[in-house]
Image: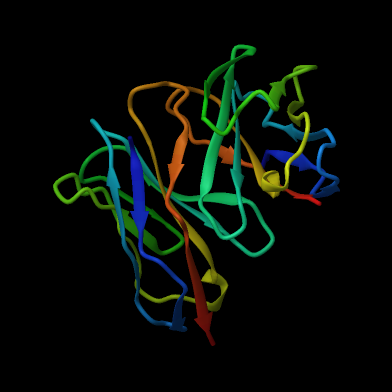
């Protein structure tokens, strides 16, 4: 069964460094998402992406964040200058159509020191 | 704005016990409702869903009924197993946008004793 994959599974970085989290959505899916879960807290929406542009973003998704679908298969989340409070599990998700189910990847655990 | 409230955990039960995890929501119109499960060390998996009032979602022995009148979507299972130990998230998707984000509850950790 096709699934969303994410790399790396864990990443440790220094405060102020740039990180890129990578996702490979399911191949015929058209809608893409990033969510994050700070340890012990709820899963929060960051951004949705459709037709090569951001369709919605939360207040968390400030100028330090960007997303890209560079090659038709990968979907990346870049954090330009990481802060301690960016430490979280980041989930990628995708869906095929408007009313379809979102499928989630296994997550990338990011630790900012 | 839209929100989901679910019962706080952790919930610890013995094997074969009856499970209920309460979930209520606030949303305009007719959202779609979901239960996701996160097994240890894994990502979020869709457990079941319901897209309109009075629909019952079911999967792996779990059930939840979309109750518009009480704005609830409680998760139930008649006889839990050790393998059901996981974190369960109630969630909704608003009806107003095709690219709608999913809004999650805070999660309920379930532990089943053998």
Query: Which quadrant of the structure image shows residue A61?
Result: top right
Q: How many marks?
A: 0
Identify the residue shown where x is 72% and y is 20%. Answer: A68
The correct choice, above or below, for B107 with respect to B66 in the image is below
Quadrant where the C terminus of chain B lies? bottom right
Residue at screen point 33% across, 35% down:
B1
| Foreground of the two, B13 or A61 | A61
Picture coordinates of residue A63, whole percent (x, y): 66, 23
Q: Which of B33 and B28 is in front in this view?
A: B28
Give the x, y percent position of residue B95. 33, 27
Q: Position of residue B88 (x, y in %)?
A: 48, 60
The residue that appears at 74% across and 34% down in the rendered structure is: A23
Q: In this view, does B17 lie above or below A14?
A: below
Colour logic: rainbow
Note whether residue B83 is visible. yes
Q: In this view, does B87 lie to the left or right of A92?
A: left
């Amino acid at each position: 069964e096709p699934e969303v994959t994410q790399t790396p599974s864990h990443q440790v970085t220094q405060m102020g460094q740039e990180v890129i989290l990578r996702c490979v959505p399911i191949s015929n899916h058209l809608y893409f998402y990033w969510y994050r879960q700070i340890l012990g807290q709820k899963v929060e929406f960051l951004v949705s992406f459709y037709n090569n542009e951001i369709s919605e973003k939360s207040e968390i998704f400030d100028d330090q964040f960007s997303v890209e679908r560079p090659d038709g298969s990968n979907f990346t989340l870049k954090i330009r200058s990481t802060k301690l409070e960016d430490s979280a599990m980041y989930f990628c998700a995708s869906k095929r159509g408007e009313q379809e189910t979102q499928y989630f990847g296994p997550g990338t655990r990011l630790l900012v020191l | 704005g839209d929100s989901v409230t679910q019962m706080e955990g952790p919930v610890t039960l013995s094997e074969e016990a009856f499970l209920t995890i309460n979930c209520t929501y606030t949303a305009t119109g007719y959202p779609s409702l979901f239960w996701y499960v996160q097994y240890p060390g894994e990502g979020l998996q869709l457990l079941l869903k319901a897209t309109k009032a009075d629909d019952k979602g079911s999967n792996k022995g779990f059930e939840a009924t979309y109750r518009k009148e009480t704005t609830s979507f409680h998760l139930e299972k008649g006889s839990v197993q050790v393998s059901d130990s996981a974190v369960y998230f109630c969630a909704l998707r608003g009806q107003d946008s095709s690219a709608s984000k999913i809004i999650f509850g805070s999660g309920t950790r379930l532990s089943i004793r053998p």
